[in-house]
Structures are given as C-alpha cells and as structure tokens.
Amino acid sequence: MLDILVSGLLLSGTYALVAMGLNLQYGVARIMNLANGEVLVLGALASFWLYTTSQISPILTVILVIPISFIGNYLIYRFLLTPLVRRSKTQGALEVDSILATFGMSFIFIGIMVSIEGGFFFYKYLSEPIQILGSTTSLNRLVAFLIAVLIGAGLYLWLNLSRPGIAVRAVSVSTEASGLVGINVPRISALAFALGGTITAVGGALISTFITLDASIGVVFTLKALIIVIMGGVGEIRGAIVAAVILGIVETAVATLIDPGLTLASAYFIFILILLFRPQGLFGRRAV
Amino acid sequence: MFRRKLLGLAAALTVAGTSVFAADMIKIGAIAPKTGPLAGGAVVTQWPNVQLWVEQVNARGGLNVDGKQMQIELIEYDDKTNPGEHIKLAQRLATQDKVDFVVAPYGTGFNIATAPIYGKFGYPMIAVSAITDKADELTERYSNLFFTLGTTTAFVDGVKEILIEQREAGTIGNEVAMVNVADAFGIELADRARELFGEAGFDIVYDKSYPLGTPDLSPVMKGAKDSGAKAFVAWSYPPDSFGLAEQAIIEDLDVNVYYSAVATSFPAFKGAYGNKINNVLGAGGTNVDDPVIAEYRDAHLAITGKVADYWASANTYAALQILEQAIEGAATLDRDVVTQFIKDNSFDTVMGSLSFENQVSNTFWSVGQWQDGVFRGVKGSNVDGAVSVRAKDGWSD
C-alpha cells in the first residue's frame, strides 16, 4: 500500500512538471501549445547533451535552462504568436490558429533536435536506490518530485500573493475585463507563456534523468499534459496539481493491483468521467 | 536580367552535370525512420550501416557492373515511423527518383507493409530488422522479399534453452517472471513464450504487459520481484529495455537469469550502466573475436563515429553486401535478374557465408549476454563462436 502511495506521488510529480507549464500557457495566454512536449524534450536534450559532452550535472543544467527557455518562449510569443492574438476576433479563432501554428512549430523543434541527437537521450544521473517509508525508489525521481513541489508551491503563492501573479489570474478569468482595469494584457500573456515554457523545459531536464527520451517523443507528453490541464481546470494551477496526483496514484495503483497494461486505460477512464460529470474540470469555473 | 542569365547558366550546368555522371552512377534508395518511435533504434542499427556501406563501396571505386565502375548515389528519406508515409516515399523513389535498388525498411511491420509496393516495381528487399513466424507465408506471396534475422520462435527458443540449462545447473527453479510491451512485437513473442516455456515445464508466476512508453516501470519491477522468481524475461523495446534495467538496479532484483529483448545489445546500454549490467541477457549477439566482425566494427566506428550495436548492425551490413555482390554477380541493373541471383547464390559477408532457402537465411544470433563489457552471442543458428551463459549475480559495479 505504501509502495503505491510513494511511487504514485513520485509519478504525479513528473506529471505536474509536464502539465503546469501548459496550464499557464493555455489558461492565461490562451495558446493551446501543441509544441509543449517538444519544449519539454528540448530541456531534456540540453540536460543529456551537457551531461554526456561536458559532465555538467542536470541540476546545474536546470539553472541554465531557466533564463534561456524564458527568453526563448518570450520571443516565440512576442514574434510568432502575438500576430495571431491580434488578428483573432474570438477566443475560438485564437485556439484554432494557435493549434496550427504551434503544431508547425513542433516539427521545427523536432528537426532541430534530430540534427543534434537522432537517437535516445541515454544517460544516467542519480539513479541510486533510496528508501522512503520502507519503499524503494530512485533518487532522481525524488529530486524531480521535490523540485515539482517547489515549483508548484512557488507558483501557487506567486499567483495568489504577488501583484503580477494576481494580474495573471485576472487575465485568465477575462482578457477584456482585465484590460479595462488597467492590466497590460499582452505583457501579462507574454509573461505567462514564457513562464509556462520555462517550467516545461525545466521539467524536461529533470525527467530525462529517469525516463529515456528521444527527439520525437514530445507528443506523448503534450497529450498527457492536455489531459491533466483539462481534468484540473484550465488556468487553475491547483487543479493541475490535484489532477496530476490523482493520475499518478491511480496509474500506480492499477499497475500494482490489477495490471500494468491497464494504466493508460485507467487514465483515460478518469478523464472521461470528469468530462462527463465536471466538464469545466475539477477546479474550473463554469463558462458564463 | 543578370540573375536570370545566371540561373540559366546554373540550370545548364546542372543538366550537363547529371548527364555526364548519370551513366556512371547507380542510385540506391533508403527509407527508414529518422523521427518517430522507431527512430532511436534506426539511428543505431540502420542508418550508420547504410552510410558505412555507401562510403566503403564508393571509396573502392564503386560497384563493378558488367565491367563498368558505378559510384553509388544514395537517396534517403525519413518515413517518420509512419507506414503510410513510407509507401508514399517508396512510390516517389521508384517513379521520380528512379532508383535502381533499395535498402529494405526498418521494423517488422514496415517490411511487411511495403513488400507490395516495392514488389510492384520489382525491387529485391533484403529485410533485416524484421522478425516473424510468418516468413514462409510472406515469401510465398512476395517473391522479392528476403528475411535474414530469424523468427519469433527461434528467439523464444534461444531463451528457453538458457532457462533449461540454468534450471539443470540449479541456479533457477521452475518459476519465471515475464513481462512484455503491449504491441505486436511483444505480444507475439510473449504468446509464443507462454507455449514454449509451458511445454518445458516452466511456471510463469508473473505475466504482465505494459503499454509502450510507460513512464514508470517501477510497479512492473516490484511485481516481478515479489513473485520470487529467479528468472526474469522481458519482451521489450527501447526505451523500456533501459527503463526495466534501471528499475531492476533500483529494486536490486534478485535473479540469476535476466533477459530483455531489443536494445539490450546497444552500446549505450553499457555506456549508461557500466558493469552493473554484467551478465544481462538480450536479443541478438555477435562474435567480436571473429576477425571479419572485428574489422567491420572498427570500420563502423571509424567512418560513422559510432560503435556498432552487438546484434543487427552486422546483419544490416551483411544484407547490403548481399545486394552489392548480387548486382556485381548478375552484372546488370535488371532487378528481376538480381533478385533471382540472390535466390540462387551464396554470399560472403561479415556474418559469414549467407544463402537463402525459400528466401529466408538461417544464419543469425538469437541471444547474447553482456560479459565483461562486451555483448557476446550465446545462442544462435548456424553461427560460430557462441560462449557459454553465465548466471547473473547482483547489480553492483
């Protein structure tokens, strides 16, 4: 039982890292970023590449990744996505446009990554066994989990207590209304997009220490992130975290008690239940 | 105006260029994944060997086709691990690029799915990365398709023989823990293993599948550990072969036989785990002491900058050697004649002398083992140099 709880919680840390970034990008900047998984894999590639070529610890890579991915994502929003935001008349139109644009972007990312490393990002870091409450797990998963908790808590506090954080939440509620009360919506949206991309890239760098990725695997993470964001409620950081915990624990429980073959099925089953009975997501607001 | 002239000049030069060289060039088409789920395997096993072969052949002056030296022009495409994409590209190779011959695709499903289109244009396909028990049925249907890497049954049989030997030696009992990746490859092997292991008196005490790309394999490994079996068999793909080994190390899985299928033979496997994976068994194998293999591996490293894997790399190169020798032997670019030549002759390759019986070659390694930093063949069919199996003893450095 404790095994399930420990493994499940650690897995949910991974899922939270995958989904928190997309939640900000989709919930606040209103960009349905289909290149989310590729950004994650870019972070993983940085970690792998620096570790295998110059023995730089992935933890240090994370610190390097933060400014680079923040600036990179900011520029993407500023120059590639802002024109779409400007010309779209409704949110629906923006979603369609951003899906197409980021889908195209994902192929560019894949192409860049394949040209750097076409094979598996295969390296090991901190894969030492460690005992938690009598259950064996690996140190790298624990580190990723702790950083996920740190990011989640930090983000939650920032969103609720700081002035820019509250502005971000206001934009996620209504772009028109926040504009009317003097919030610089384009700037806040760009900030949210860049922050989301940064969290995703950091997640990738950490995840690559225990999951072997390759340049083309991004779409798997995009899908998982999408499920978690929709389950938790768009634009709700608490929702994403709770949804990640539910998925992590349920998948681990099903894998341990019933059959590992049913993990995906169980994840989608919960997803369907939530869509049926709470379509706005666990913490989502009903559309008005 | 000036620009137009320049363009015209460039175009004229290009046309002249091709017409001069066309006569002395032989076009070879290669389509395999560079992106998508199978890319990670293809960039280890398939692409470097294509590069190696083309460079080596061209360095020695090209192929000698009926007294004429022809340099190889390679046309390569990424099928994105998508059979539909592959078929479209195959059509393009045949009708637009007009290639003379092709390198067979990467992956069992891809070879089977594309046999009709390549067959329609008469290309001989010497498939390597394709393992199936339906080889006879398929070769009967497609007269252009050749198999060289063995059958599902042969691979399961190799593992079964090891289990029986180890049971006789007393290192394992009757209990076996078995897992498989839930896709066509893993399911086919696991089904066959249930039959064959059962016949041999083994009791599969833990028998589970997991979806491709499962992020956390720890429940699987904990389950296998709790079963208490001293033998662990995984019909796995990359990257889960890596993930399972990682979890086995974390959980300190106490077994005397540990087998994982595809990618266990990749040099990166040892690169990441070092001596922890000593005595791990996996699909494939090679005989590094064979001077021909050793020379091939050196060339592979020198030209592609990568260490050849310890399994299908050599077979992939051998298949290209067969194509090369068949074209030179048949002394023509006529594909039907070359196909017939492949059927009727034996070929001198890095895998030794290879020949086809009903379009199937029965020279291959089925099981190998990491022994002191080298993945050596321990079970195979018509191959020399198999070493004896060692029992796994812990996961420490």
Image (cartoon, rainbow, N blue to C red):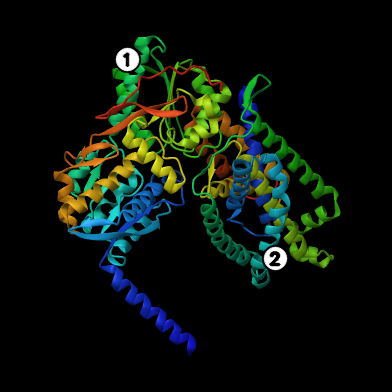
Marking on residue B201:
1
Residue at figure coordinates x 40%, y 55% from the top left: B79
Q: Would you say the residues marked 1 and 2 are in contact, meaning their CB atoms lie under 8 Å apart?
A: no
Residue that mark 2 sits on: A78
Q: Residues within 10 Å of mark 2 (few under 14, many from 20)?
A: some
- With respect to residue B159, does B267 lie above or below? below
The Cα atoms of the two marked residues, 1 and 2, are separated by 66 Å
Position of the C terminus of chain A, as image quadrant, is bottom right
Q: Mark 2 falls on what kind of element?
A: helix
Count of numbered labels shown in the rendering: 2
| Label 1 environment density (alpha carbons within 10 Å; few <14, some 14–19, many ≥20) | few
Name the side, left or right, on which B61 lies relative to B277: left
* Type of amino acid at the residue the image marks with label 2: Arg
Residue B103 position in % (x across, y down): 31, 52
Is any atom of residue A260 visible in this view?
Answer: yes
**Picture quarter containing residue A168?**
bottom right
Q: Is residue B311 above or below residue A102?
A: above
Residue A138 placement: quadrant: top right
Identify the residue shown where x is 23% and y is 44%. Answer: B146
Judging depth in this view, the residue of A254 and B369 nearest the camera is B369
- Mark 1 lies on a secondary structure that is loop
Labels 1, 2: one chain? no
Is residue B21 toward the left or the right of residue A65 in the image? left
**Residue A235: image x %, image y %?**
70, 52
Q: Position of residue B186 (x, y in %)?
A: 39, 34
| Chain for disc number 1 | B
Instruction: Provide residue B375's location: percent of width, then percent of height.
Output: 42, 29
**Amino acid under disc 1:** Gly
* Front in this rendered view, residue A2 or B229: B229
The structure residue drawn at horizontal position 43% and vertical position 43%, both measured from the top left corner, is B301
